[in-house]
Image: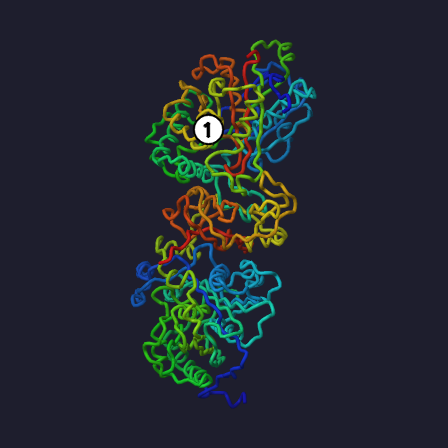
Amino acid sequence: MRNGMAGHVPAISATSWEIIADMLSILSAGTYVPRYRIARSDIVEANRWFAGGMGALAKGARAYANWDEDAVTMAVAAGRIALAGHDLPGDVRLASTTAPFADRQNAGLVAAALGLEEAVSTLDLGGSARCGTSGLAAAVRSEPAEGGPILLCAAEHRSARAGSSEELTSGDGAAALLLGHGEGIAKILGAAQRSVDFVDHYRAADREFNYGWEERWIRDEGYAKLVPPVVAEALAAAGLAGSDVDRFILPAPTPAIATSLAKRAGVREGAVADTLFATVGFTGAAHPLLMLAAALETAGAGERIVVVGFGQGVDVIVLETTSAAADHRPVPSFADQISRGLSTGGYMRYLAFNKLVEREHGIRAELDLQTAPTIMYRNRRMLFGFFGGKCDRCGAVQFPKTPICVNPNCGAHDSQHNHCFADTSASLQSFTADRLTYCPDPPALYGMVRFQEGGCLMMDITDALPDEVEAGRPLSMVFRIKAEDERRGIKRYFWKATPAAERV
Amino acid sequence: MAKGIKDKVVVLGMGCSTFGERWDAEATDLMIEAYTECMADAGIDKSQIDAAWFSTAIEEQHVGKSAVPMGVALRLPMIPITRVENFCASGTEAFRGAVYAVASGAADIALAVGVEKLKDTGYGGLPQRTRGALNDMYFANISAPGSFAQLASAYRAKHGVDAAELKRAMAQVSVKSHDNGAKNPKAHLRNRIDIDKVISAPIVAEPLGLFDCCGVSDGAAAAIVTTPEIARALGKSDLVAVKSLQLAVSNGTEASYGSWDGSYFMTTREAARRAYEEAGIQRPRDEVSMLEVHDCFSITELVTMEDLFLSDEGAAWRDVLDGAYNADGRTPCQIDGGLKCFGHPVGASGLRMLYEMYLQLLGRAGDRQLPDPKIGLTHNLGGWPHQNVCSIAIVGRYDS
């Protein structure tokens, strides 16, 4: 067989699967797009002196992570949106090629930040831009743990050299799919997968940036030859023709590829999904799931969706939305997040947040703080799950949870049970915009936050302009990087406040 | 309540170094400067000191931990020395230790020295440092100006004061202190400024501008205390006595209970009530002749006037603009320039405040001398508005 395969690519070599009766469906989905945007024209303009040929890409804006975001925090954000109103998962998986830790389970951190009990299965997926769709293919065929459905998150904090076309096409973001038994909002109709070591780009384990080959070759020998047979196989497995497809999701760094491949598959032009190039950029392994999750937010019942993942092979998954899809309208929606973009700061801020330029931070920034795993472990529920205490005797809600109740008229010992602050309404009591303290995105915004269910905490405020912050402002809580210890390579995570999104 | 400290202990001598950017001096030099003046004033020999207290807050920037740096610097004859640290209130804590030692009878004569050498960090403002290993994992990224600045936003919201109006009152706090500091040869900042200059200065932490913030300085101050009887026996006739020494420490109510609105200091109100009671002061506005408060930031001083019950709640900003706390006002405040202009070498500040009260009560304040003051109050606060220590000392003439 090995010899027989040599020298040519067979017409159809994908593996399609039997659709089994108890295959998991998509119960819910969430998207996350970081708030910062950079206009591609700003990148093109700044690099014109060196790379004059990028003008064709000077369209739209790409999303990029704030300095305090990474694949884990973005996965948590998407996961929280997907989970709202649903049973907590018993299994959390994170697909990413840019997860912050090579050896400390990133999915475990996501599960902790979601406040899940520790009896949860967790798994990191990575290694390819295809790991999001491969993760979906694997998850829907698995039997969920007794603890609850599977939460599959995919997130990428892309890294590209300044002035590269990859810098222009990339975007940061995340998606989360909740998978479980039942009809859900979309069920799987068929799928096919194929593994080919087609190296359009790669990144060695010790490297920061991708090394990519010629775009024309990737288009003609990669997407154009590898994808169509797998699409055909998956559609055949689903018993559908190309013309039955309502949404054709094919993420690629350049949008034109999707249109041409859809045409070859017999999919009508109007069914080709927006690649989100104009608003987000290509979020790598997260992108197929981000496009799918965004599509599900506007889908009605009975829509047939094809999702393609590409990267050293091809995954194609065919789904059909159910009657519940019309009620799936997560908050904040993908559209809400797109409309809340902030494009202040320009290219220099983008470069600084992505560590593509060595900024002067001042001597204050030299403070060296070690992170003791002993302390982090003892306080993991507090730091990651944002759990404080509620006194069983007087009802006082407090953060942190301590052995003696903070209520001066109570003072009970060992009287508190865990109380999660992550999803409680809060407002700002007092605040400042601090230009003295070191912050990668000055001024440092922080203030005293009062929680509606009781308790208060002096908190950092993120993803906000100074004029968006005022006393009485409603706030939401977000899981973010608190500080990064570059000397030892560890990030500290905690919760921050952000101005609550007004529905658009 | 216990009987209290009133009139049990008197000041035998005090000293204070010149404050400022003392590029010329080590912490040791500053200690010796204050100690030498203090010893000459007390008129005693080091062999007569029974015990000493040593305050410094940010020891990692200069002398290191323990009381050894003081023993070595002053070559004290292996007497008991205790090092104390309680944020920016450390200086008053050293004084309290010495006073309590004398009051208990364990010591006849006790020395308190506070020092801080802050200008070896390479930048302005207080040194950036750990807040404790767990705290560093969840405390907001607060600086001193940023935490105190929030008093302004909460005060505005609570009392409905217009932002520009409050900013103007805050500016007057600083203008007044510069007027006073200009007359003080030992002060760090000796220039006069006007309200417009304060208002138009660059913002440090909204709404605090550069001139709303006190100087970060190098300096030392010292006090020697004893009993009235011993002071008399040593030939002193004009005595300044301790009337009250109180300390209030946050217990988490402000930071995590939710009953505090952020516009004032719970600790200051608590300490002030106890201090007035201990000193037998019924009507502070009439009885307190002058005060030195912890004006780390203009807004701190402003709200502190209410917390010390010297202004009505919500009215301090008007009293400030009306000049109530000017050198010629109803209750002169920061006669020596305050932290704002005399400077703020953290561990020395509480003793520096007492030094001015002592000079004023003895009529030795030179150009700054107030007419016949009888009671002086010092207020020395450390930490942040939502989590702090507040010490209040009241001193007065022994016979009053």
Tell me what residue is drawn at x 46 percent, y 26 percent. B338
Q: Using residue B304 as the reference point, say whether residue B112 is left or right of it.
A: right
Q: From this view, report whether residue A301 is shown above or below residue A477.
A: below
Q: Using residue A485 as the reference point, say whether residue B371 is left or right of it.
A: left
Q: Nearer the viewer, residue A92 or A354?
A: A92
Can you say which quadrant of the picture contains the N terminus of chain B?
Answer: top right
Can you say which quadrant of the picture contains the C terminus of chain B?
Answer: top right
- SS at circle 1: helix
> Where does label 1 land, which residue?
B306
Q: Using residue A36 as the reference point, say whether residue B236 is left or right of it.
A: right
- The three-letter code of the residue at mark 1 reads Glu
Tell me what residue is drawn at x 64 percent, y 47 percent. A415
Q: Using residue A186 as the reference point, say whether residue A411 is left or right of it.
A: right
Residue A368 position, x and y percent, is 54, 47
Q: From this view, report whether residue A73 is shown above or below residue B36.
A: below
Residue B23 position, x and y percent, is 48, 31
Q: From this view, report whether residue A163 is shown above or below residue B281.
A: below
Disc 1 packing (10 Å; few <14; some 14–19; many ≥20): many
Residue A66 position, x and y percent, is 43, 56
Residue A105 position, x and y percent, is 57, 63
Q: From this view, report whether residue A67 is shown above or below residue B64.
A: below
Tell me what residue is drawn at x 53 percent, y 89 percent. A3
Q: How many marks?
A: 1
